[in-house]
Image: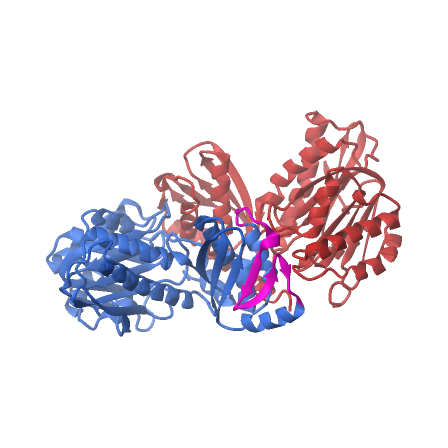
Chain colours: A red, B blue
Amino acid sequence: MKTIPGGVTAPIGFRAAGVYSGIKKKKKQQLDLALVVSDHEGPVAGVFTTNQVVAAPVILDRLHLKQGIGRAFLVNSGNANACTGSEGMEAAQEMAQLAATTLNCAPHTIFVGSTGVIGQPLPIACIRKALPALAARVTRRGGAEAAAAIMTTDLKPKQVAVRAQLGGKLVTVGGMAKGSGMIHPNMATMLGYLTTDAAIGQRALQSALKQAVDQSFNCITVDGDTSTNDTVLCLANGMAGNRPITAGSADFTRFCAMLETVCRTLALKICWDGEGVTKVVRVEVTGAESPKAAKQVAQTVATSNLVKTALFGGDANWGRVMAALGRAGVPLDPSRISLQFGGVPMVRKGLGLGRAAERQLTKVFKTKEFTILIDLAQGKASAHMWTTDLSYEYVRINASYRS
Amino acid sequence: MKTIPGGVTAPIGFRAAGVYSGIKKKKKQQLDLALVVSDHEGPVAGVFTTNQVVAAPVILDRLHLKQGIGRAFLVNSGNANACTGSEGMEAAQEMAQLAATTLNCAPHTIFVGSTGVIGQPLPIACIRKALPALAARVTRRGGAEAAAAIMTTDLKPKQVAVRAQLGGKLVTVGGMAKGSGMIHPNMATMLGYLTTDAAIGQRALQSALKQAVDQSFNCITVDGDTSTNDTVLCLANGMAGNRPITAGSADFTRFCAMLETVCRTLALKICWDGEGVTKVVRVEVTGAESPKAAKQVAQTVATSNLVKTALFGGDANWGRVMAALGRAGVPLDPSRISLQFGGVPMVRKGLGLGRAAERQLTKVFKTKEFTILIDLAQGKASAHMWTTDLSYEYVRINASYRS
């Protein structure tokens, strides 16, 4: 498997574009409407937010996913179309209908997405007006433009593509995502759109996507909130001409690895582009009694504001990690716990290793990327999470998001 | 019941003082060691952190609480004596022993407390050296000095006292607390020391304190972390000479109200003095199916960083409240939910009430204190939490706490 340039239009048969439709307040050259189209329809897999307050596009996409066939993604930024009631549902349906008419396909093959402010009516007139030009604009090189058009407070568009020999052919998986605020598992907020020219059935695709998301988007946290709009979709058009991938086969395993690489790369790009982020840190928990316990400890440490501000300050305050794991709700024996930061042992059997270790630790905390290793010494299960620091910038961006 | 000046030395028979012992790095006139002594020993009640990583003084106090008799509180700031192993336990025991020798009482009647940095050895030599002068210094007017000596990043000492006619006599309850970072239920981090001259048995006192803490310290959150050191203790010396208060009596109910007032006043002072806090907001949940569900929703909203930064920014972003309650892990019907902010209806049956309501809301968000009312319209249970905004200052203070 190798990484290649591009994103959603890297696989055969995908075109994309982005335009400014008027949903965002105009500032400079910003885009707010993206279209990704496959030349042919194909199976679609999707995973969505577990938040119980869900946006209209999520409700609609879940409905469309029951048929499991897709042709295009139509996504706007600047408005989340969430908490907008039946009017919002109608707007989401109209988005799908408009794209279906323009592309001459069935509405249920259109998957729509929205991201931005919650609770304001989606200005569907903007989309109605912009769609013909957008549809005319899609090209094989339009992936980057589409990735730019789904951004909100993101600083950079996020896309990636990988390619590998699979079932006798070169198969490509591409993807784009938007993230920034509200990044937390279940699922990591954000919109993620994956495309592939692999030939694969819907159920195998769904299972592969679920696995990939669990190991990537569901392992990152920026601020512990989950959004009403979280969506990851993958459309497979089969145009690579490979032998169809079946669940459980060696090809399936390799395809899963490709999806996971794309998802993990996008997830880490989201972390790095998280609001005000200056550090991305992997929290790894080993020696837990169960995978669930391991995950719970990793999550509690990864979402602790006190840990996150210490990361920002470059402050080797390992005591905050101990305090955070102690409230994870998992039975622990503090006197067994060991901590390493970037490979430097700092706590052994619950005890700090003193000033010399701390001096080394201070150096680790000044780097931009390292691992916090927590060994509970109770069992054999492990889990990890990526987290980010909590900075002034996070507060600034989130205090004034709508203004 | 009326509020009177003073704190832990307001009840009859309590003396206190604070000194600088050398535990903190010296900056200006700061104090770091407090002693509160009762002329006579009496029943003690206590509640402690639910964190599984607990500091040595908490372990020791839990042990002493089994006897349930107290004479004095000895508390240092600048060092938490947590994650310090058997050496830390010895230091905590020595603190108690030193005070017991000085005051000529049994070590188990001394309750010790520590707050500050985790994982560094407690410089017990400082305490050993400072204690004689501290013990000589205690006076009936020393409550404020003791309250100042237990501060860490607190900006202001926190104390309060209330008095009421009870069982034929004037009974007084006083208290002091330190808080700031790591304020979260179970229990709200912090140290809280309550004194009273009421005559009351240990079991009744323990039950009253538990209730009071549940309705006060356990209803506040600053940053969602719980500390290794959280402790609230109450010592009752019986010197008011009232008829002994028995559980279930009318006097007991009135005494509970006094304790709760003291605890709630201290808890709100902690919120207001929270790191970088500019707003204190009450999150009230009604119409829940169970008290537990109500509490869970209140907590999830109260600890959401996105809600807290919106509060700081004065941004009427009610969508973040909807998004936060949707991930509380409680079954909800979004189409029944109503929201009011400071009495202004903003969401009715899951739908935003439009621009005019939002303009009013913007005014509410600019005030320093208001209530977010969440009506789930599912049942009859309710709960509340106080939360604070998340500001630049929070990040600044916590990024550099140890430096």
Which of the 4 image quadrants contains residue A31?
bottom right
Residue A111: image location, x then y, percent: 76, 46
Residue A263 against residue A122 in the figure, above or below: above
Task: Decide if residue A83 is in sight here.
Answer: yes
Residue A277 seen by the camera: no
Q: Is residue B62 magenta?
A: no
Determine the residue positioned at 61% across, 39% down. A214
Q: In screen coordinates, is B40 left or right of A88?
A: left
Figure quadrant of the C terminus of chain A: bottom right
In the foreground, B340 or A227: B340
Residue at 30% over, 68% down: B159
Residue sitting nearer the eye, B58 or B196: B196
Compare residues B135 and B286 and report the one nearer the observer: B286
Task: Residue A289 in the image: state x and y as whole percent.
Answer: 44, 33
Q: Nearer the viewer, residue A15 or B20?
A: A15
What residue range appears in magenta? B328-354
Q: In the picture provided, is A310 more to the left or to the right than B17?
A: right
